[in-house]
Amino acid sequence: MMMPANLETDADRLREAMTKALAEDGVPADPGWRAAVGRVPRHRFVPGFYLPADERDGQGLTVWEPVTAESDYGRWLAAAYSDTTLITQFDGDEPDWKNPQARHGGAPTSSSTLPSLVVRMWADADVQEGHTVLEIGTGTGYSTALACERLGSADVTSIEVDPHRLEQAASALYGCGYTPTLAVADGLYGYWPEAKFDRIVAACSFRAVPPALLAQARPGGKILLTLSGWLYGYARVLLTVNGDGAAEGQLLGGTVSFMSARTHAAPAFGNPAHWAAGLPETGRAARHCPERIAAATEEAFHLRFLAQCAAPGAQMTTVGETVHLVDVVTGSAATLTPHEGRWEVREDGPVKLWERVEAVLSAYDEGGRPGPETFTLHVYDGGQYLRHPQMRGLSLPRP
């Protein structure tokens, strides 16, 4: 199928409508970023993507339908100019967009992040004209293009761990006239050839702040990144680097999640039943129920992050009514099972996983249930410490 002759006209109209809708919502507040959204042709960066079907398959898995200009021009262009994250890759497999196939389940490994979040991140990082910027996670290149539009290509460096993704992004960027420095590199180690940077912004998440990023930021420079973990708790932090390997900054509000840097992704842990088989036959009454960290609420989203700071090796899954916690690092395990109106805990191993989570939940309650913006992350002497005036300090995993 040939591209319609009126593609650019249609795209201009939809981009103008999206920009106007974002502005009405107050995103971005900065007119410079708003102008960038109005000029960057997002459709050039997403020749194909997946959207979820209305119904799951027979196994209960989400069916992801491929959408391209050739398969459904109207749906493709409308989605490209919606404030939606568009999944472009699953499980590290680069699709053949000339002959795409539906996906059943799978883990997204690359996407075009929703435009409102992209510009919010650039704005939250306090990126200004004249700043040199390192972006970690080029993805489709759309967010890179926004930075180039606002700052000029010469001040933008973007790295991507997936060479196929970077090749596609580079083609789109150069085709639109943007010429940032691009490289295949692991975000854990930043990009020394272009250091030092005024701002570092990561579009993936890390279990702890990578030391290389601290070393590659100028004194007074800022690093915006998302912290995550194996309980799938997330927090965003804006760090200011002081020049001697230390940094500190407050957590930011909101419920933002990003795909993990691939080397920080959670490991497979096997069969939960095998772990549970080694636990004591009798347990104790739980002081806190697992819904505290598992519910689909903003508070639970925040609590999952605090909980995984206390038990950084823990992973959680539910089988039937039983909640399993498994720690492949220490060999510890725990189960929570509903019993006569309460939850019963059985746990064993070097780390009492649920006991650690309960200690955090109790301290959180006693501290007045403080929100993320009241926590400060301190990075110094090789350690990373989350602090709050009313709560005992928590440590992130060693980077």
Image: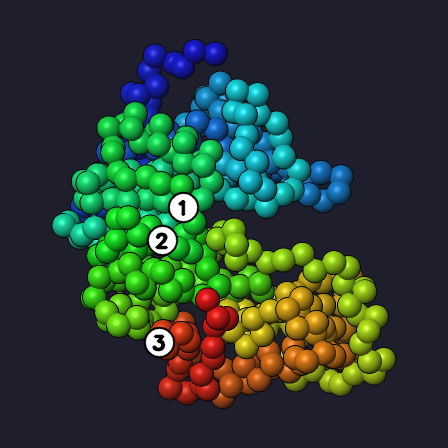
Q: What's the amino acid at mark 3? A: Tyr
Q: Toward the viewer: 60 or 243?
A: 243
Q: Quadrant of residue 77?
A: top left
The residue carrying pointer 1 sits among few (fewer than 14), some (14 to 19) or many (20 or more) residues within 10 Å by Cα, namely: some
> Which disc is residue 185 wearing?
1
Q: Please report whichever mark, 1 or 3, sits nearer to the chain's N-terminal start.
A: 1
Element at label 2:
loop
CA–CA distance in space, label 1 to label 2: 7 Å
Instruction: Between residue 61 and residue 353, name the one nearer to us.
Output: 353
According to the image, label 2 marks what residue? 190
**Left or right for 176, reference 370:** left
Q: Is residue 246 left or right of residue 382?
A: left
Q: Amino acid at mark 2?
A: Gly
Q: Position of residue 373 (x, y in %)?
A: 36, 72
How many angstroms separate mark 3 from mark 2 (CA)?
A: 19 Å
Q: Nearer the viewer, residue 333 or 35?
A: 333
Q: Residue at x 72, y 68 (%)?
A: 324
Say whether marks 1 and 2 touch (CB < 8 Å).
yes
Badge 2: residue crowd in 10 Å (few <14, some 14–19, many ≥20)? many
Residue 269: image location, x then y, percent: 70, 60
Q: Compared with residue 190, is residue 394 higher up or lower down, i.e. above or below?
A: below
Q: Is residue 378 visible?
A: no
**Which circle marks residue 380 in the picture?**
3
- Looking at the image, is mark 3 or mark 2 earlier in the sequence? 2
